[in-house]
Image: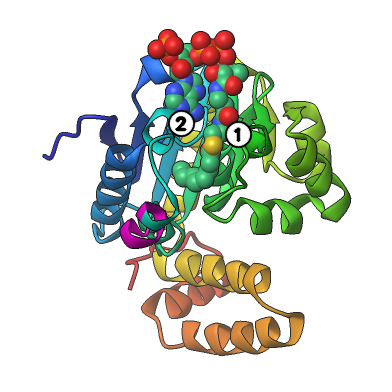
Amino acid sequence: ETTYATILVEQRDRVGVITLNRPKALNALNTEVMHDVVAAAQAFDVDPSVGAIVITGSDRAFAAGADIKEMSEKGYSDMLSEQFFVGWDALAALRTPTIAAVNGYALGGGCELAMMCDLMIAGDSAVFGQPEINLGVIPGIGGSQRLTRAIGKAKAMDMMLTGRQMKADEADRLGLVSRLVPADRTLEVALDVAAEIASKSFVASSLAKEAVNRSFESGLLEGIRVERGLFYSTFATDDQTEGMAAFVEKRKPNFTHR
Ligand code: CO8
């Protein structure tokens, strides 16, 4: 079992849980956090006993953004030569469904990290924002793209150009979050949703995730073509045969995730 300096990692049945753990910095996402989160998530991703991954923070902060102290010393050529934060892209490339459980601040890179996950369970204490504009920068791990696709241009421009914070109820209304829950139940609900997802056929859930993401990442026609190919490919799996047979025979399916 690997241990990490900036995160806590555990497995609960078929659910992998990653907890950001830099309380003194409100879970600011420095390079070390990136390496830890990505390593833990990739280890879960190749583990057949894991069917869903939950990423969470503390009651006060999911994450208050990229680590401003780390970034403040850097110049343009440092960013380019280090390919700063490019590692985060690996998180969006996981096959395993990911669920962000968000309480408190999800600002800047924290909001971007939450949006990188497939589902977002938000407590009513959650506060979202892209305050980079106040630091003279802009989002850097997909926030401008994912926020715009999630809540539309009008709201995304408002958030990104003013840096204003958006409370959980507005974020829920706009479709940024999957489920809004009382803050003291956020992790519990996220774990329940994760367990439910992990109980399904992993081949089907990872293909479903890929199909939705393709819609998010491309035009409708290309997305539909990709979906059709992925749909056909489910008919090469044991779980499709078993799932449909179980329905016809009026019994519960026994998926082998193959
Ligand atoms: N980076 C580094 N340290 C931070 C950060 C951060 N983003 N956020 C909070 N901290 C630290 C504070 O410096 C403070 O440390 P110390 O006690 O040593 O001074 C400690 O956490 C507690 O914070 P506060 O005292 O400020 O707590 P408050 O309750 O008064 O305020 C806020 C909470 C409103 C969240 C406030 O801390 C804040 O505004 N933080 C910065 C939010 C922000 O601007 N985030 C965007 C950062 S830029 C960014 O994310 C760019 C994304 C591009 C790539 C993303 C890759 C992941």
What residue would you read off at disc 2?
68
User: Under tag 2, what secondary structure?
Assistant: helix
In the drawing, does residue 171 fall left or right of residue 71?
A: right
The image shows residue 247, relative to residue 4, as above or below, that is below
On whether ligand 1 comes within 8 Å of the CB at mark 2, the answer is yes
User: Percent position (x, y) of residue 27?
Assistant: 42, 26
Discs 1, 2 touching: Cβ within 8 Å: yes
The image shows residue 81, relative to residue 113, as above or below, that is below
| Figure quadrant of the C terminus | bottom left
What secondary structure characterizes most of the magenta part? helix
User: Which amino acid is tagged 1?
Assistant: Leu
What residue would you read off at disc 1?
135
In the drawing, does residue 6 fall left or right of residue 164?
A: left
Q: How far apart are marks 1 and 2 (CA)?
A: 9 Å
On whether ligand 1 comes within 8 Å of the CB at mark 1, the answer is yes
User: Percent position (x, y) of residue 192?
Assistant: 50, 36
Circle 1 packing at 10 Å, graded few (<14), some (14-19), many (20+), is few
User: Percent position (x, y) of residue 117?
Assistant: 52, 50
